[in-house]
Amino acid sequence: MKLIVAKSAGFCYGVKRAVAMCEAAADEFEPCFTLGPIIHNEVVVGELAERGVRCASHISEIPENATVVIRSHGAGKSDYECLKNKRANIIDATCPDVKKIHEIVSAQSKAGRFILIIGSSGHPEVKAIAGWCDEHAIFESADELISWLNIKKNAEKDLSVVFQTTTSKILYETCVKTIKKECTNHKLFDTICNATFKRQQEAEYISKTTDAILVVGDKNSSNSQSLKHICSHHSKKVFFLSSADEIDLAEFCQLDVIGVTAGASTPASIIKEVIRKMSKETNMDGTTAEQEESTLQEPEASPKQEAVQSAEPAEEKKEVVETEPDSEADDDDDSESFEELLEKSIKTLRTGEKVSGVVTSITSTEVSVDLGTKQSGYIPITEFIDDGNTSIDDVIKVGDTIESFVMRVNDVEGMVMLSKKRLDAIKNWDIVESARENKSIIEGTVTEENKGGIVVNVKGVRVFVPASQTGLPKSAQMSELMKKTVRLRITEVNQSRRRVVGSIRLVQGDERREKAEQVWNEIEVGKKYDGVVKSMTSYGVFVDIGGVDGMVHISELSWTRIKQPSEVMAVGDEVSVYVISFDKESKKISLGYKKGEDNPWTKFTDTYKVGDVASVKIVKMMPFGAFAEICSGVDGLIHISQITDRRIGLPSEVLSDGQMVDVKITEIDNDRKKVSLSIRALLESPAQSGGGGSSAMHDDADDDDNSPAIVYDTDNPPSMDELDDMETEEE
Ligand code: F3S
């Protein structure tokens, strides 16, 4: 005995997709429901139930806020509305081929046409299609259709005809013939899906060339029933079974060649079990079941079978898709668009082609696109949100028209893999080329980091930026730039090697030059700038004030004495500075940092006047007196003669560093920022001083013991200048 197994037997892409979506939903959401069995196969439904998926036979069984997977057969418009009212999380696993029929009937109804649906009235797919129509009628057989059309007023209606996706070729052809003969104004839509078409072709061929054929499928599966129907036309022995258990081997003992086919909702495990049982029990040519199984996947080549395997189904269907001439519709814009739709439905797609379509659904993994062809298009969701931060809703929505590039066409599964990125890359290649020629700046997102540099995605084109051109300091990590938007200039384009090189540094250089020019045009003494500390030396810091560096001398950093600029600021600090002076020719700018309002001398003179008494701290001892801090940044001198009311050799005989003493302010020299202090003035009684402490000091100016605070030697008193010099020398 020999077995021939149909290549297309088992899950179609629509079923695979629905089951995968349901499994993913079961893992992620709780509670998770399907509205009716996800596909017509009890084994699959049972497995999903074990994963927590509950099958609701009616929407009323679904609680609010639940996750609901719409099965591959689809659902009516009102079901969606009802689920929305229940705030359900809807995961739409409707097969794209079925979805397309919903769109067709919905648009045809809107155009005022009467919809004829050829299919099983009780089948969920047909019920769902009816749920998207206004006026409609459903026919399960050609006879029913003929009787309805025999009523004249029905035949005269503006009819649009669609077919259940799993309709048999025989029924389809009979109905088409009848409608063409009876109706005056009709539009025919060949909505049998490619997966079904392929299975039916193979089933027909195998049933003609074998002694018997096994059709494996669930009894409720419409496409499995259609296969049985087709096989029955060409073979006298057709066995319809849902599992290997139903095989009665006695039936096959006299047969030489047996065919096996299976519906689109039959899992591979069941088909394999059937093949195993047939192989083992009949001991076929002494080979093992596994060997037979793999051999049998490839039916013997024959011209006819070649046609089955590689024929373009659309070509054969072209003839029957034709619409009868519709004179009334010629003037109708809507009708025109459906003529176009029909035109497109027979279009063949090729890899590398640019296509345009409408987004029909968006899931967590893919965007479905209706290309107006028999195949449904898919674009991976990652093509839209590769930065991880963007929401898909911000990028694209259902109903949007989108252009893409055909990556792969799978006619058997009726699907086309599309790429938007690839098309963008092709379209944007010219933009990149002209950016190089014009030296213009373009933007991109950093997507990769490697040894030599980074890769920037510029409108879908990969642009390599060497590490030296990233604009980062040597010590910085290139990973800092990951996922950031950068501005760059294209420096090299090699189309044949698909190599593009860019530079961020060049852009930064250009920008810096532009800013520098602006600074030099507008600079003036006193102008304030916000800048960034670029570098530091022992004598000052260099601050970038926007394309130009200026220097802040250490003496301009603080009002108090500092030893290092780092006591005030660090590299990278953002600081406010002002221009002290500049030279456009030598390109030098001198900046100030310390603020006038922080000037300690101003604060001192605002607080004290001559004659005031202050509590001060001795900070430095000199032979001619002691310096004392009056307030932060202002010291005064207590001359040796003003330390006490008796003669002393050195200030240290009375005072010590850090000691706090009360003093009288005896003189303030605003020009030279000098202050004279006296302890002695506070020791004298008002009678001795002839009044207040300070006036007594002045009254005693000619007395050696009561000399003014600035007098060092009573015989040869130093001037303020001399005292100043002494102080400076000492320092
Ligand atoms: Fe879809 Fe056709 Fe399968 S309609 S679910 S691809 S049988």
Image: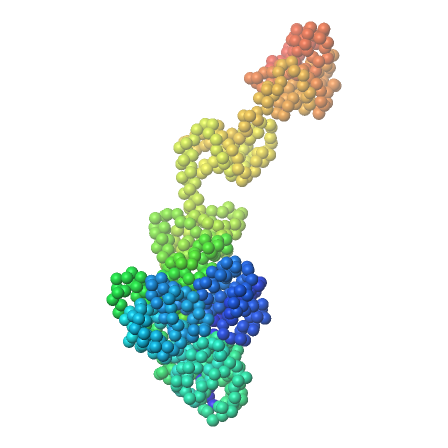
Position of residue 104 relative to residue 521, above or below, is below
Task: Indicate the position of residue 102 as horizontal and vertical percent values.
Answer: 40, 66
Q: Which residue does the image show at 64% across and 23% down from the upper left?
A: 631
> Does residue 144 appear in the picture of this structure?
yes
Instruction: Kindly indicate the quadrant of the structure image that contains residue 62.
Output: bottom right
Q: Which residue does the image show at 48% across and 37% down from the upper left?
A: 544
The residue closer to the viewer here, 52 or 517, is: 52
Q: Which residue does the image show at 31% across and 61% down from the upper left?
A: 334
> Does residue 100 appear in the picture of this structure?
no
Task: Indicate the position of residue 473 as horizontal and vertical percent values.
Answer: 50, 46
Task: Indicate the position of residue 67 as horizontal and vertical percent values.
Answer: 54, 62
Instruction: Kindly indicate the quadrant of the structure image that contains residue 195.
Output: bottom left
Task: Indicate the position of residue 474 as horizontal and vertical percent values.
Answer: 51, 47
Position of residue 138 relative to residue 549, above or below, is below
Q: Residue furthest bottom?
A: 254
Q: Judge from the rendering whether residue 1 lies leftward or rightward of residue 644; answer left or right.
A: left
Q: Judge from the rendering whether residue 331 lies leftward or rightward of residue 506; answer left or right.
A: left
